[in-house]
Amino acid sequence: MKKMRIVVKIGSSSLTNNKGEMDEVKFNDHVKAIAALKKVGHEVLLVSSGAVAAGFSKLGYPARPVTLKGKQAAAAVGQSLLIQSYMKKLNPYGIIPAQILLTRNDFSKKERYRNAYSTIMELLARGVLPIINENDTVSVEELTFGDNDMLSALVSGLVHAEQLIILTDINGLYDSNPRENPLAKRLNQLHEITDELLVAAEGTGSKVGTGGMKSKLIAAKTALSLGVRVFIGTGEGEQKLLKILDKGGDGTYIENKLLTTVTNQKQWISLHSTVSGQLLIDHGAELALLSKGSSLLPAGIYDIKGTFNKGDVVEVIGKNGLLGKGEVLFSSEELKGLMGKRSDELALSSIEVIHRDKWVRI
């Protein structure tokens, strides 16, 4: 089997019992399966939920807290318990885990995004198992990933993984809710995530975790857009992850032949950057951007909206609306004196406003 870089996402429901406490049998099963993946030479990253679920009972909560302060307090206790458990269970296999706690800010800030990538790649190069979770203790609602399904998709894209495995307590995706409809049919393979599937997935989820099946579909759609194949399902035993890679998993495979790897720079522009302004362009510039793969030049710009600096990300607007986003090489003030002018009228060594390598079509 080809050696691959694999992201495994384990949800709260796959780590805990019905009371929300850590389930040792489930936990051991996951650890053995991860060890089996690494034993045959695969690079593995683990996105693990369970901090809130592991911590809330220790604080005296009868069930998973619903308030932000309750969740954050439970995560503060539970995250240390979670990583301690992983360290103890992985030690007999000679696997060193590394804890990485991320927030949306770590993705939205370009330097922090690059640093996260560099750190993870160094850990993988040294054979370490990165264990990634959202930093629930300090996250605020407006700056969260929503759930670890989306975090796992974004991490998969960041490290250019070949496969994302989302383990859950339901064996794949169905055409309707299998808990309500006994005739629901499982979808063994998908090539795209449609709006109809997202509607059908409403309300299918776990009592313990934050992400239902719809969140997993949205995450899978994001991962596909970044060139990563996805599996959503369940499994048991030491060989379960290897079986999934060998197309024998109990769940749904989501992939197609047109997957294309997206550079980290374009991922950041497309998914994480903050938009600082807009450039309005004419038909010729639109044609050059969309059909010819060209960079955006000053001659095609006829209006500027907002105030921005060199290196900021702006939206590009054509005749019929938003075309895409890109990182500008001039400030808004500089562009006011350049827009509409032909290249031979500008005494500049570099005249691209947005280079094609820093441009993402929407």
Image: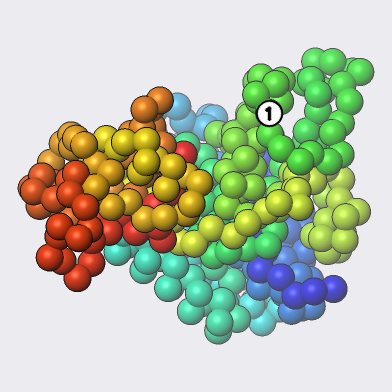
For image coordinates 46% across by 61% down, the residue present is: 264
Q: Position of residue 22 (x, y in %)?
A: 63, 48
Task: Give whichever of 286, 173 is nearer the camera.
Answer: 286
Secondary structure of the residue carrying tag 1 is loop
Does residue 72 appear anywhere in the picture? no
Q: Is residue 99 left or right of residue 272?
A: right
Q: Position of residue 189 (x, y in %)?
A: 83, 41
Q: Spot the residue most to the front.
A: 344
**In the rendered image, the vertical position of residue 129 relative to residue 359, given as above or below:** below
For image coordinates 35% across by 43% down, the residue present is: 285
> Image quadrant of residue 199?
top right
**In the rendered image, the vertical position of residue 222 relative to residue 342, given as above or below:** above
Q: What is the crowding at mark 1: few (fewer than 14 residues within 10 Å), some, or many (at least 20)?
A: few
Q: Quadrant of the N terminus?
A: bottom right
Q: Position of residue 2 (x, y in %)?
A: 80, 74
- Residue type indicated by callout 1: Thr
Task: Give whichever of 298, 229 is nearer the camera.
Answer: 298
> Image quadrant of residue 30?
bottom right
For image coordinates 75% across by 48% down, the residue present is: 255
Q: Position of residue 245 (x, y in %)?
A: 82, 60
Q: Spot the residue most to the top.
A: 180
Q: Which residue is mark 1?
A: 194
Q: Is residue 358 left or right of residue 176?
A: left
Q: Is residue 181 left or right of residue 306?
A: right
For image coordinates 81% across by 28% down, the residue present is: 174
**In the rendered image, the vertical position of residue 315 relative to residue 267, given as above or below:** above
